[in-house]
Amino acid sequence: MNDKKSQTSPLTYILIGIVIVLLLQYLFSNDQTQSFSTTSQQNNPTVNPYEECITWQETEYHDGETVCVIGKIIFVDSNYDDLSGETIWGARFSMADDTFRVVSVGDSLEEWQGKCVVIRGTLKDRSKQEPEFRFGPWMINSEFSSDYIIREAPVGQCQ
């Protein structure tokens, strides 16, 4: 019987050493990253990403500007437009005729009724609009123009 012990090559020891060093470096750098992020979170107050947003009542003072608007949509309605062949959706923030409105050509806004939303977009410059469209500040999305992005606002943003 041949009792030869298998010898481990020096290359195997080198590779094992490299793997251990890399593993230790990873663990050490991960610890520092977590420590840094925890420290920076403690040193910097939480910034409200909606701080620059205006309420829907303030939109009348920002014609033609690109803004962030926060508010609760209380009513969504729609009408079929014979001329374009599309359904025109409107989301209102109050029942007043001159309220801020969000308008969508073709895409339903029903899912937003009763929800507090954040809308980022460009308000139509009413001074350049036909008289029938000067009823109040508005943003529109259509196949020709995507003037806003709408999302549900985090809890506590609407009063």
Image (cartoon, rainbow, N blue to C red):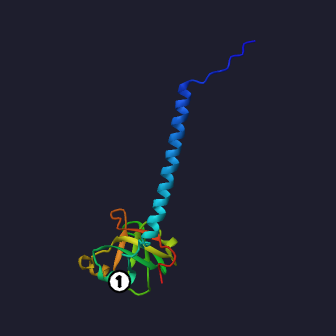
Residue 91: give x, y in percent of width and height: 44, 76
- Can you say which quadrant of the picture contains the N terminus? top right
* Circle 1: element type: helix
Residue positioned 49% across, 60% down in the render = 35
Q: Is residue 86 left or right of residue 31?
A: left
- The answer to which quarter of the image holds residue 79 is bottom left
- 159, 38: nearer the viewer: 38
Q: Is residue 3 left or right of residue 92?
A: right
Q: Residue furthest right?
A: 1
Residue holding disc 1: 58
Disc 1 residue type (three-letter)? Glu
Residue positioned 53% across, 49% down in the render = 27
Can see residue 79?
A: no
Q: Residue furthest top?
A: 1
Q: Residue furthest left?
A: 128
Q: Residues within 10 Å of mark 1 (few under 14, many from 20)?
A: few
Residue 144: give x, y in percent of width and height: 33, 63
Residue 158 vs 47, above or below: the answer is below
Residue 65: give x, y in percent of width and height: 29, 74
Residue 98: give x, y in percent of width and height: 36, 85
Residue 37 vs 62, above or below: the answer is above
- 156, 103: nearer the viewer: 156
Can see residue 13?
A: yes
- 117, 93: nearer the viewer: 117
| Tally of marks | 1
